[in-house]
Amino acid sequence: MAKPDACAAPDAERIAQEAAISANLQHIKNKILVMSGKGGVGKSTVAVNLAQGLANKGFKVGLLDVDLHGPSIPGLLGLKGLAGTTGQSILPVEIGPNLKVISIEVLMPEKDRAVIWRGPVKIGVIRQFIADVEWGSLDYLVVDSPPGTGDEPLTVAQTIRDAKALLVTTPQEVSLADVRKSVNFCFQVGMEIIGVVENMSGLVCPHCGESIDLFHAGGGDRLAELFGLDLLGAIPLAPEIVRSGDAGRPLVDLVEPDHPAAAAYNRIIEQVVRKTSPA
């Protein structure tokens, strides 16, 4: 993929790109932006398991990684190769029959190369991801955003006007303080919020099965109540989550459905489906 010019595109090119974006988005029923004001809350892990869980239910799903400086999606899914191209289009990496993935890392032969781009270039790349990738017809496009309320989530909000946000937090106040900013970001840009996910909600002891509140408890519930949002679920910490990330396999595919974390993900997925299905 050619690096876009940091300067404004000529009018004809801009119009053509807008048309391509509009055409692609018309074939995608639901768009979900997974975001958090705080880094390190497991947002990418949530995005991967949400996307894979929806695909496991038979939905056609795209997973778009707009974290350009620290993409985690390829590692969490065990992606090794590069995305293909056909003409001017980018072919997403296909995982099974129902999941397509694109990330800056699957477009770069040198995986450890640092991406050092300013805002205008990042905006151009994200727009290319939407305009030039052959997503086809999808039931869901899950977008994994870097932490904060800067260029990346703002570009998604301005480009995908009907995107809805899923906010990820951990229970402690240092996370909640930043996620409150994400809530206000959504209010300011007019983005509907599907709900809140509390990640790292207690540590499940692998020996006795009891839960230990390492990061306090109930923070996601309090955040949801403060803003009149729904708490979609609380995902506990478990050793299998680390193993699944290192193995490049989503937790929902690696453990039995009754595993506490997998069960939490499945409840969240059911809530997302219910909230995005036509009335």
Image (spheres, rainbow, N blue to C red):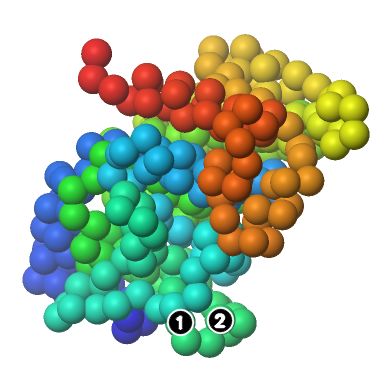
Amino acid beneath label 2: Lys
Q: Nearer the viewer, residue 213 or 244?
A: 244
Q: Position of residue 198 (x, y in %)?
A: 66, 29
Q: Measure how far apart labels 2 and 1 are at the Cα level.
A: 6 Å
Q: In the rendering, at what x and y percent does residue 177 appear?
A: 72, 33
Asked if 162 appears above or below 6 in the picture, the reply is above
- Name the disc covering residue 111, or none: 2
Q: Position of residue 247 (x, y in %)?
A: 64, 61
Helix, strand or loop status at disc 2? loop
Report the front residue among 144 and 269.
269
Q: Can you identify the residue that label 1 sits on?
A: 108
Q: Is residue 241 above or below residue 87?
A: above
Can residue 149 be seen at all in this image of the molecule? Answer: no
Residue at coordinates 35% horizontally, 75% vertically from top-left? Answer: 83
Q: Is residue 206 left or right of residue 249?
A: right
Kindly identify which numbered label has been placed on residue 11: none
- Is 105 on the left-hand or right-hand side of 84? right
**Badge 2: few (under 14), some or many (20 or more) residues near its Cα, within 10 Å?**
few
Say which quarter of the image contains residue 201.
top right
Residue furthest out toward the front: 256
The answer to which image quadrant residue 56 occupies is: top left
Residue shown at 28% from the left, 45% from the top: 60
Q: Nearer the viewer, residue 203 or 112?
A: 203
- Give left or right: position of 15 versus 171: left
